[in-house]
Amino acid sequence: MAREFSLTPRSVAPVETKYRRIATAFPVPESLPILEALHRTEPIAMQGQPPVVWDHGEGFRVFDKWGNAWIDWSSGVLVTNVGHGRPEIIEAIVKQAQSKLLTNYCFPSEIRARLTTRLSELMPEPMKKIFLLTTGSETIECAIKLCRANGVKEGGRRKNVIVSFEKAFHGRTLGSQQAGGIPALKEWIVNHDPGFVQVPFPDGFRTPDTSFDFFQKCLSDAGIHAANVAGVILETYQGGSASFAPVEYMRQMREWCTAHKALLVCDEVQAGFGRTGTLWGFEHYGIKPDLTTWGKGVSSSLPLAFVAGRPDVLDLFPAGSMTSTHTGNPVCCAAALASIDVVLKEDLAGNAQRMGAILHEQLHALKAQYPQIGWVDGKGLVAGVACVKPGSLEPDGDLAFEIVRRSVEKGVLMFSPVGFAGGTVKISPPLVINEEALRESCAVLAECFAEATAEARP
Ligand code: PMP
């Protein structure tokens, strides 16, 4: 099976339901000039997603210009927590744009003060200082910088080790990629910083030993002394599989970090703002990190990300030395304020929890039916369906790709498979999805598994 989306239209069975509409061929023939223009002018690395040419989005649906409609299981890439094209966000953006303040660097502005105040009030102690940035990777770079600066302050220059986890994803810049745990993505880095160390993530699936003792053993096997650790960085759940660490493991991690004066950093870029059925992902662990990094769902739209953390840590650098040109862009701030209001007013964490219960029940039923599903993980409205060769833990990236391809052709939009060897089908609809659309899209997923596994049989 080829793992590339072909640009040659194939005829597909037409679909017409209340929420989905797919005409007779995919990719849509009229969309080809746009797809070809992108292929001509963008790097090949941009070509990984299903060739659906987005025109607009509304709630949990995405539309092209030619009358086709998808139930969205991607949220872009876990961005549109409050739904696509929310009128409240559009209105806030337009109002801010019309005020003629489109940028203001680090000069003070009222809208930036409103957002940092709102976030600081919402965040639990001790995460009361807020540093606005633009992308998730940028927040991770900042967290690394703060961990190391704090490490040097607490224990001298040897206290610089950043511990993170195998199979983690924290972004594509030099530091965030070194904190990541996917070796293939780091092959371009020839001069690895020895201060970045990864240990197995306690997912209970590929790492059966989920004890905290195992964490300590892996560190000492790697020759790392706890005293030299500046920070431990983990995704609140691992994006590649939607796996959480055990609660007890995280409680011990919290104590261990405190005991060794290492900062505990939760990367909430995917997990924040209701996605997992709680407002913040780390709530599931009953712990408070020292630093947190956020992006994606904070605005449900325009690029805005931030670091929230302990004031003494965020204040380690003097005035003028932690800046970014687009920090707290006024239009992005307006979008974020509007999105946060919707998350809270509509209790979207609650909806994620209620809809998530249905989603996970459906996925577990599917797993019981197919030995090709090795593991289903996640909470709330994020789930990972790990495709494996039956009877083994060997990932089956071809099957995962087939599932996504078929699903998109049937009107349920997903991004390409993620995780170890591209074996995970990731499900992350906007948090406003209703039960009818959720059940309909789960039925489509079941159809895809039935067809793809039947076809794979000799
Ligand atoms: N951390 C996590 C957990 C992510 O999922 C991502 C993006 N997928 C990032 C960091 C990087 O964010 P960005 O793409 O905005 O740089």
Image (cartoon, rainbow, N blue to C red):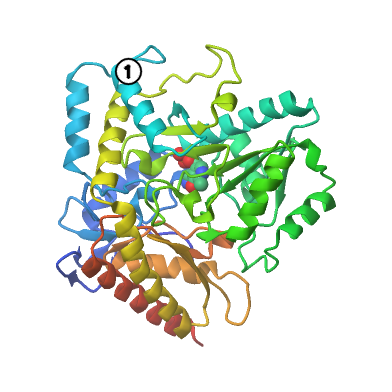
| Residue shown at the point (62%, 28%) measured from the top left | 146
Residue 134 position by quadrant = top left
Mark 1: few, some, or many residues within 10 Å (few <14, many ≥20)?
some
Q: Which residue is mark 1?
A: 103
Q: Secondary structure at mark 1?
A: loop
Task: Please say if 110 is above or below 26.
Answer: above
Relative horizontal placement of residue 121, taking residue 97 as reference (left or right) = right
Q: Answer yes or no: is residue 183 visible.
A: no
Q: Nearer the viewer, residue 140 or 250?
A: 250
Q: Nearer the viewer, residue 373 or 265?
A: 265
- The spot of residue 199 in percent (x, y) is 71, 52
| Residue shown at the point (65%, 32%) measured from the top left | 147
Q: Residue furthest bottom?
A: 458
Q: Is mark 1 within 8 Å of ligand 1?
A: no
Relative horizontal placement of residue 358, taking residue 152 as reference (left or right) = left
Q: Nearer the viewer, residue 220 or 326?
A: 220
* Tally of marks: 1
- The spot of residue 251 in percent (x, y) is 62, 53
Q: Nearer the viewer, residue 25 or 449?
A: 449
Relative horizontal placement of residue 86, taking residue 265 as reference (left or right) = left
Circle 1: residue type: Thr
- The spot of residue 218 in percent (x, y) is 78, 54
| Residue shown at the point (29%, 33%) measured from the top left | 337
Task: Please say if 368 is above or below 374.
Answer: below
- The spot of residue 321 in percent (x, y) is 56, 15
Task: Please say if 426 is above or below 189.
Answer: below
Task: Please say if 383 is above or below 47.
Answer: below
Relative horizontal placement of residue 248, taking residue 160 as reference (left or right) = left
Q: Answer yes or no: is residue 79 visible.
A: yes
| Residue shown at the point (53%, 66%) measured from the top left | 397
